[in-house]
Amino acid sequence: MRSFRKSSRKFLPALLIAFAASLTAAVRAATFPATDEAVFSPMQEEMARSLKNLKEGDFGPPYFIAYRMVVGRGMDISASFGGVVSENKYHSQTLFSEVRYGNKKMDNTSIQYQGLSAEAPLSGKELRENLWILTDKAYKDAVAGYLEKKAKRVTEFRAENLPDFTDEPSTRSYEPQEAPSFDDAAARSLVKNLSRLLRSYPYIYHGTVILHLGWSRRYLLTSEGTKVSGPYENLPNYLSIDVNSRAKDGLKVSNYREWVFKDMKSLPPREKLARAVKRLALELKELRDAPLETPVAAPTILDPEMTGVLFHEALGHKLEGERQRDPLQGQIFKGMVGKKIIPSFLSVIDDPTMSFFKGVSLHGHYRIDSEGVPSERVVLVRNGILENFLMSRWPLKDFSHSNGHGRASSRLRPLGRMANLMIEAKNPLSPAALKNKLLKLLRSEHKPYGFRIVGAYGGDNPSERTQAQTLQLRPRLVYRISAKDGKETLVRGVKIVVTPLVVLNRILAASNDEALSNPYFCGAESGWAPVDQIAPSVLVSELEFERLPENRLKPPILPSPLTHLLKHGEDAWPPALIAPSPLTHLLKHGEDAWPPALIAPSPLTHGKN
């Protein structure tokens, strides 16, 4: 089962170390190899030894080994209503080992095989020690997996006799990369100032601004000669703003916005960010006052972001190569190559080689995939006809090579995955013409209203045969459109529930307003991967809306103290409304003048370690 969500990556406790408020202006990694060879040298030595001598009894050495090291450095800062809530930095080094026993025609792997991983030192004898232990365990697991797989073939029916690993040329690639450096003072100032703007909206119950600054580098070495080093993510940083409140009926309402970016200089101007905060807050107020929608099926326009999410979930995941071989999967499009699967005016492409769209860096861009195969532009569907799949090195019938889509998080084995998914439409309409087409459809079907969807929180679409292939999409904003006059009314409390084959073939037309939806992470068996979608608005002849789960709570008893602030000045916190706060001391004595009596000494004061 997979999910698809915004990149509001929760802080990972295993990777995070709390750090004191008195950080220096720049945070730099304390331990770092002088050269890439400091990482590759121990890998090469242990790999050579294992390929020659790693055997047990009648079982010979593995036929393939891959080592991958992902080094991560970063920091996370969150703030609420002008005050810093948390500051964390992380320092991680994840080692992954993939060991294959047998041969390329049949080895120990399957879609469930994940290899082994562990935290490890970055270089030297310590790294080789970890490689030794990890490779030994991976080899034993591989032999056991091979024997189990061989035994199953005695009893299990196999419709196809396909190899387990493709032949691919080796890749050598080196991309230089600056050492990690983070300006914590600038980061803290940004989140504090943006979150302070939320004080102007006392109806916001919770408002959080999170800034993640990351740096990561990947080292990949295989026994076939592949040797790759370079940045692990194209856009390692993100800024998110999340606000919520409750309507008068007690139901929660929320709103959200996020940006991914290469560095602080590539963030939108502060004025634009401030306008985004204001817009989020005003939309939240409208949601509080919006009527509840009831379950209904009606024609609907999806904006570019929701269109992208729909195709990602309903089509993209179904075209991942491994799913065509796994009998546990739904395999909706297996055997459909050359046949029409969506309307003929639509084409679907996935192109990780594409690094920019209209001047904006793409989240899903990469040059070389997690298996060391150069990425390729792949036309999945051309004019409605299925042509290709998202291929890793696990072959399919008539698809005997990878197309550079093998992707994985640092601890897992690569599988065929999406990157930059693009939906193209022939003869698109203007947005106004698309709405007129919706109104004509409503009137011809004698329906009182349809809908327009703006934005998406993501979706969830099971692919296993044991589960119904039902897709759920969570819209950010839902507008009801009157068939009589086209008037739009914001409504709340509903989600979209559809089945992939049906909904894709209900698309009647597309607009010429294609846009990029960048800040997404996609989850599947090989972990979380950065992705994006480029899509137009589309008109769907019918979508089903169902109620969201309810958790009604009474509003706070007392009014927000922000109400008093807005009336009497930013710093006029009335003592009767709140308990004494250390912020009072800050306002009087300076931003960093924390009085010793208010906080205990940090355990990090003694030293970094």
Image (cartoon, grey):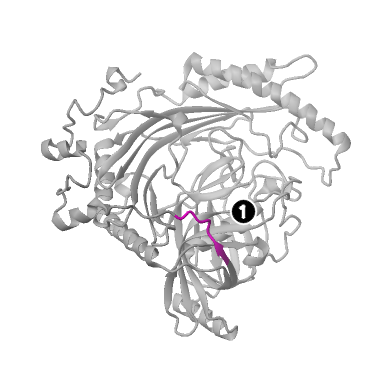
**Position of residue 184 measured from the top left corner of the image (x, y, whole percent):** 28, 36
Res 249 quadrant in image:
bottom left
**Position of residue 544 measured from the top left corner of the image (x, y, whole percent):** 59, 67
Q: Is residue 535 above or below residue 143?
A: below
Residue at the right extreme of this rendering: 154
Question: Quadrant where the C terminus lies?
Answer: top left
Q: Is residue 485 above or below residue 454?
A: below
Visible residue check, residue 379: no
Q: Which residues are magenta?
A: 545-552
Q: Main secondary structure of the magenta part?
A: loop
In the displayed structure, does residue 129 sit left or right of residue 213?
right
Q: Secondary structure at mark 1?
A: loop
Reading the image, the residue beneath label 1 is 461
User: Residue 155 or 280: which is nearer the viewer?
Assistant: 280
Q: Is residue 210 above or below residue 483?
A: above
In the displayed structure, does residue 83 sit left or right of residue 461?
left
User: Residue 609 or 577: which is nearer the viewer?
Assistant: 577
In the displayed structure, does residue 123 sit left or right of residue 385?
left
**Position of residue 193 measured from the top left corner of the image (x, y, whole percent):** 24, 48
Res 601 quadrant in image:
top left
User: Residue 214 or 376: which is nearer the viewer?
Assistant: 214
